[in-house]
Amino acid sequence: MDAKKKDRMKTMYQALTAIALVLLALPAAAQGGKYGATPEDSVLCVRNQSLYGEPARNGNYTEAYPYWQEVMRLCPASSKSAYVTGAKMLREFIGKEKDAARRNVYIDSLLVIHDMRIQHFGEQGFVLGVKGVDMVYYRPEACQEAYDVLKEAIKLTGPNTDAGVFSSYYQALGCLYAKGSATKDQMLADYVMIMGHIDAALENEMKPADRDFTVKARDYVNTQFFKIAECSDIGRIVGDMVKERPDDIDLKVRLLRVLNGKECTDEAIYRTLAEEVHKASPSSESAYSLGMYLLKRGDKAGAAKYFKEAVELCPSCPDRVKYLQTQGQLAASMSNSGLARSIANQILQVDAKNGEAYILIGDAITTQTGSCEKPEMWGVYWSAYDNYARAKSVDPSVADKANDRMNRTTPHFPTSADAFFYQLTEGQTFQFTCGSLSESTTVRTRK
């Protein structure tokens, strides 16, 4: 690089650094009125507001920026929108800047104007959240500073915190954990706190775009936590937290969700926690949790009781189909075909194209074969086959499972000779009655 180019770059960097230093000094210097310290300042303030406004609205930030800087110098208390616009411009410059020194100056300026906005317009919790998100995005390596800012923001805004602040906060905490400056205990404690706020927010009415953003933030935090969490760690930490706050049922509800989310149902604390939560505040989620716990331990009757309760406590909740499917599958495995088919029909009332429901009907039907003689026994398998075929035709996502069931069913079909003995031919309609079944199906023979 030639000497002249070095000098130009040095001069440019010094100028930008000076700008940042001026901005840093502004909060202390600007003690005048809303539009400046003197009448002359007021005139220049209004003039520069006009000069930066139009090009900024048109996205011409290079033209607008010098006039905006003058507004910040002369009258930083004149307009909150100036800070919003300034942040947009600086983010644009940061994104396009290739020179590291210039980029850092722009980042410094962006962070400074967040502080200036708080000084002149308040909203400390909200603006600290915006500042912290910018810190994580533009300087992810400086995670301690970002974490401290975001922690204060969440402390001030609580459940009203923007979802992006939560995900940035947990990203900063993950960075600290990777550096050895945070523990798994802290990761879990903060995870529980964040998910409590996010779950509370999702219970409220919000615009579809805001809900989608909040769900994405929740999914991000879940992903980051589950990367480092092991069930043994979670079980230990959950046990310690319950001991510290034995009467905090809201905490226990959130901790149960953590154990369920990571499928840590084998931990010693799990059953006690699930039963306490369910007793204090029966819900479909806690009933389902206990049902799954007992099912894993072979207590089908106990599990069936809780799965039934989960369905009853969830007349229209988003997980109703999941609870019904689990209840129905258990009923089929216990040879309660009537209940299994009834549950499958309830699923189809909610979701007419639910392939799992048709598979459940097929499974329930096959449990009846032991009470039938030929040719009715073949009718049971044909009818089950019908439902498996129906499952994959309405729901391609279950095609593999349906095909597997169909392949396991066809060996039970009769040979052509066996069918002929009963005066049955391939493709013929066949009406049969077997136990509680009374069905019409199609004759099929083994190939």
Image (spheres, rainbow, N blue to C red):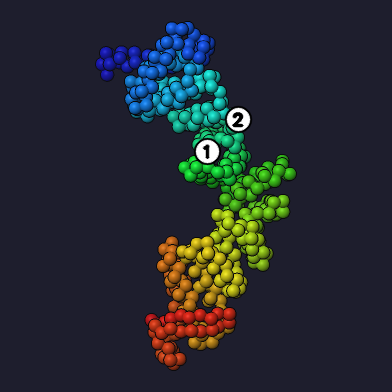
Q: Please name the residue that numbered disc 2 is placed on.
A: 156
Q: Please name the residue that numbered disc 1 is placed on.
A: 163
Amino acid found under the numbered disc labelled 1: Ala
Which residue is rendered at x = 46% and y = 64% of the image? Answer: 353
Q: Is residue 444 visible?
A: yes
Which residue is rendered at x = 40% and y = 25% of the image? Answer: 90
Left or right of residue 171: residue 259 = right
In the displayed orientation, state which residue is furthest to the right: 247
Amino acid found under the numbered disc labelled 2: Leu
Sequence-wise, the earlier of marks 1 and 2 is: 2
In percent of width and height, residue 196 lies at 61, 42
Find out whether the residues at labels 1 and 2 contact each other: C-beta distance under 8 Å.
no
In percent of width and height, residue 247 lies at 73, 44
Quadrant where the N terminus is found in the figure: top left
Instruction: Between residue 231 and residue 169, name the one nearer to us.
Output: 169
- Neighbours of disc 1 within 10 Å: few (<14), some (14-19), many (20+): many
The quadrant holding residue 161 is: top right
Res 424 label = none
